[in-house]
Amino acid sequence: QVWLVDSGGGLVQAGGSLRLSCAASGRTFSSNAMGWFRQAPGKEREFVAAIRWSGGSTYYADSVKGRFTISRDNAKNTVYLQMNSLKPEDTAVYYCAVTTGNGPYGVRYEYEYWGQGTQVTVSS
């Protein structure tokens, strides 16, 4: 079992920045990668970014490339999502998730454990 606590959401104006954090505990040694997904009202949950614990390879959705950066702190079992140049269309509940598999990391159903979600609202 892996437990995830995600935090850092809030209200920000368009063009602003936020940093989300996701702290993992439990059987973290079994995890292979951590991802961030988001879900806007009335929409499907979609992939945002992912990072492998070993090696640090990163993966991004096209919609956030160049604006968002995912990083990890292995010693703290924590993953971060730095979000810059935020747009109103980035408004959503953001969820971190862990997978013990080898991908593909952009697929929601590859992830076994999920955080509770943190709201990000970008005003225009």
Image (tube, grey):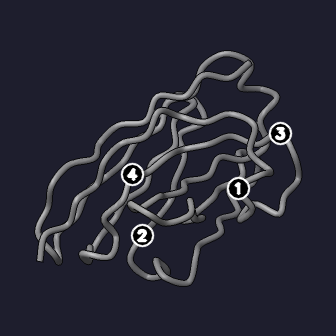
Which residue occupies the foreground of this view, 47 or 51?
A: 47
Question: Horizontal placement of 47 versus 80: left or right?
Answer: right
Which amino acid type is shown beneath numbered disc 4?
A: Val
- Residue identifier under label 3: 100
Which amino acid type is shown beneath numbered disc 2?
A: Phe
The reply to whether discs 4 and 1 touch (Cβ–Cβ < 8 Å) is: no
* Residue at x-position 68% and y-position 40%: 98
Find the distance from the CA under tag 1 to the CA under tag 3.
Answer: 13 Å
Tell me residue 97's x, y (percent). Answer: 62, 42
Q: Nearer the viewer, mark 2 or mark 1?
A: 1
Find the distance from the CA under tag 2 to the CA under tag 1.
Answer: 19 Å
* Residue at x-position 88% and y-position 53%: 102
Q: Residues within 10 Å of mark 3 (few under 14, many from 20)?
A: some
Find the distance from the CA under tag 3 to the CA under tag 4.
Answer: 23 Å
Which image quarter holds the C terminus? bottom left
- Residue identifier under label 2: 68
Tell me residue 23's x, y (percent). Answer: 49, 30
**Badge 3 or badge 2: first in the primary sequence:** 2
The reply to whether discs 4 and 2 touch (Cβ–Cβ < 8 Å) is: no
Q: Nearer the viewer, mark 1 or mark 3?
A: 1
**Badge 4 or badge 2: first in the primary sequence:** 2
Q: Nearer the viewer, mark 3 or mark 4?
A: 4
Tell me residue 5's x, y (percent). Answer: 46, 28
Q: Residues within 10 Å of mark 2 (few under 14, many from 20)?
A: many
Find the distance from the CA under tag 4 to the CA under tag 2.
Answer: 16 Å
- Residue identifier under label 1: 108
- Residue identifier under label 4: 93
Q: Secondary structure at mark 1?
A: helix
